Amino acid sequence: MSVRSSFQKFHIPAYNRNAVVQLIAFSGVGFIAVHLVWITLIVYAVPEQRSHELTFEYIGLGNLNRISERWWTLLTYGWCHRGFWEWLSNMLWLYCFGNVVQNLVGYKQIIPLFVYSILAGGLAFAGIQFLPAAMLPDGTLLMGAQAGVIGLMAAALTLSPKYRIYLSEYFSVPLLLLAGVFVLLMLINSDLKIANLGMLAGAAITGFAYIKLLQTGYQPGAWAYRMFKKMDSTFSPKETYKPMRNKSAREQDIDRILDKINDRGFESLSKSEKDLLRETNR
């Protein structure tokens, strides 16, 4: 078994260090909240068309005229889905590609990359509509996390195009094959044609560019976690002293290595650190 698959069995990050699970949770909350508002309006006898306008049309990304009136939809469209199965499908793909990126470069890159991809995909979706062949009719709405997932997919392929996801000790699936299946399914299920292709291209370029910037030493998403840290220190009560049991030197080394993986990714480990993880997993 490879070192990478051994590590994945050995350690699953806690929620506060697992940005992939956080994104799935945020998206689930968004899905429930919007549909709850929609159902509530219908229950209170608001006509279905008006209920749709007051919910989905204030979140989904439409044609150029609609975007100019509701600019915030360039971001909000990526946080809600029309139906449960669409949401579930996108979250499974997000979990697949997001975990690859998280293991390789750390959890702090996931949420900024996802948000950048949503925004870039939305801008590309809007920009390509300046072409006459790509103009969309009134009432067309783009919703879903596809752009964010595409950005994570492109980032994962940029980091490690030969990466394999191990489903068992003796069976693995190439990441490139999974990416091909995902893109093919998106194109088959899409009815937005050229505009949708623009969204996919914008998100994919963002994922590629993000990783290239990261590899040069620039941190495109560092500002987000600095902001979160500042907010947390402002609103959280100061911690009280908690007695801790003494840990052995080996346990301290393992904790340090896991923290390093969570912050900077698996590939940041030295050979000796990888060997220590492999020995611990035996």
Image (spheres, helix red, strand yellow):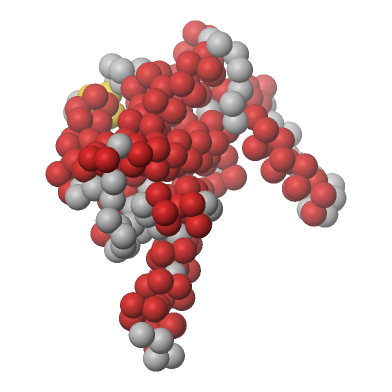
Answer yes or no: is residue 282 visible. Answer: no
Residue 234 rendering spot, x and y as whole percentages: 82, 49
Q: Is residue 268 left or right of residue 31?
A: right
Looking at this view, is 99 or 117 the one in front? 117
Q: Residue furthest front?
A: 132
**Quadrant holding the N terminus:** top left
Residue 251 rendering spot, x and y as whole percentages: 62, 27
Q: Is residue 241 left or right of residue 247?
A: right
Q: Residue furthest left?
A: 188
**Residue beneath the point at 44% across and 39% down:** 123
**Residue beneath the point at 30% across and 37% down:** 131
Answer yes or no: is residue 252 visible. Answer: yes
Residue 222 rendering spot, x and y as whole percentages: 65, 29
Looking at this view, is 119 or 123 the one in front? 123
Quadrant assignment, res 170: top left
Quadrant assignment, res 197: top left
Total count of labels: 0
Q: Residue furthest top?
A: 271
**Residue beneath the point at 71% across and 35% down:** 226
Looking at this view, is 125 or 86 the one in front? 125
| 190 up-or-down from 248: above or below | below
| 228 up-or-down from 52: above or below | above
**Quadrant holding the C terminus:** top left
**Residue beneath the point at 40% across and 38% down:** 127
Q: Is residue 243 left or right of residue 116?
A: right
Quadrant assignment, res 203: top left
